[in-house]
Amino acid sequence: MTIRRNGGGEDLHRSGFTGFVRSLLAGIPWSESASGDEELHFERPSGGVLRLHNANGRTTVCGEDRNDIEVKLHKAARAESSEAAERMLSQIRLASEENGDALELDVEVPSRWNRRGCASIEIHCPRDVAVEISAANGRIEIDGLRNRVRARSSNGSACIDDVVGDIEVATSNAKVCCTSTCGKLVARSSNGKIEIDKHRGSVDASTSNGLIRASLDGVGKHGVTLATSNGRIVLELPEHVDADVDVRIDNGVIRNDRKLEHANRDTNGRLRGRLGNGGAPIKLRTSNGSISLR
């Protein structure tokens, strides 16, 4: 492990002004820091499932043409002194366990009122591994996988790229972004926008407060459901699609650029009609905002 210290050193102590400032800062929470890196390797789990929990820090998972799992861990700690920061750094660790068909990884970060720690983890794994991630405070990034993905972050955005497989992704206070994905996609956010680009398959996306923008290259048999309480909805469909459209707003404007057969527009903010031969349901809902169908 390599440890780097910020603060400390004989030159700083010899400097009069800097030494004076350091004496003022001594004992103040998070005034000193330390960081370190680890690299670990694991065999591919027999059941092909990887579960990971990271309490505080960025989480990145990359699918590659390989048979093992490589984990790169960058740890950082801040405390009232360089010695305390180093002690806390040594207590940040990655716990691993084989549980049935899955490899379970848990980044353990101790909690102290006057000390702060975090760990960013980068994982390179076989493309066909199924991945399940939960993060309390930190961004999640996943790309290059060819199996199902489940990702949840309480305070951090979630970005999914180049994944073929069913996806469930959720954030509480940040955005969700999915690009070049294929499969059944379920996306949730409490206070954040949802952006979907070049997806092929069904979509179920909802947020309480935020924009939903979805651009689809193909629509699955389960169709598309987009719903937000306070925000705009923009849906871009392929040129040829067979679907039954149902759009409803409470306060806002419906903009439709597609030719709908048997179109029925109600005065109470509802538009219904058929695209092509009909079939896959497309339901768009917002309470306060506009809806654009393109």
Image: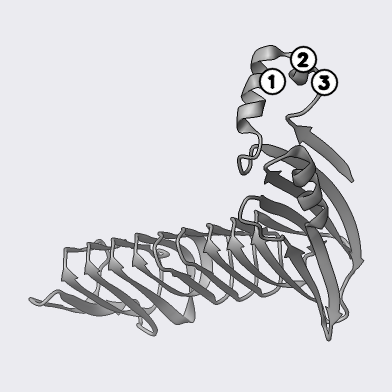
Above or below: residue 294 compared with residue 36: below
**Mark 3 — residue?**
10
Spatial separation of the CA atoms under disc 1 and disc 3: 10 Å
Residue positioned 79% across, 17% down in the render? 11
Callout 2: SS: helix
Q: Classify mark 3: residues with Cα within 10 Å, few (<14), some (14-19) or many (20+).
A: few
Q: Nearer the viewer, residue 245 or 54?
A: 54
* Residue kind at label 1, given as amino acid type: Gly
Count of marks, rendered view: 3
Question: Where residue 235 sits in the image (x, y, percent)?
Answer: 36, 64
For the residues bearing labels 1 and 2, Cβ distance under 8 angstroms: yes
Q: Earlier in the sequence, mark 1 or mark 3?
A: 3
* Residue kind at label 2, given as amino acid type: Arg
Q: Nearer the viewer, residue 136 or 109?
A: 109
Q: Classify mark 2: residues with Cα within 10 Å, few (<14), some (14-19) or many (20+).
A: few
The answer to which quarter of the image holds residue 167 is: bottom right
Question: Where residue 118 sits in the image (x, y, percent)?
Answer: 68, 53
Is residue 290 visible in this depiction of the protein?
yes
- Disc ID at residue 19: 1
Above or below: residue 76 compared with residue 191: above
Q: Earlier in the sequence, mark 1 or mark 2?
A: 2
- Disc ID at residue 14: 2
* Residue kind at label 3, given as amino acid type: Glu
Q: Is residue 252 left or right of residue 9?
A: left
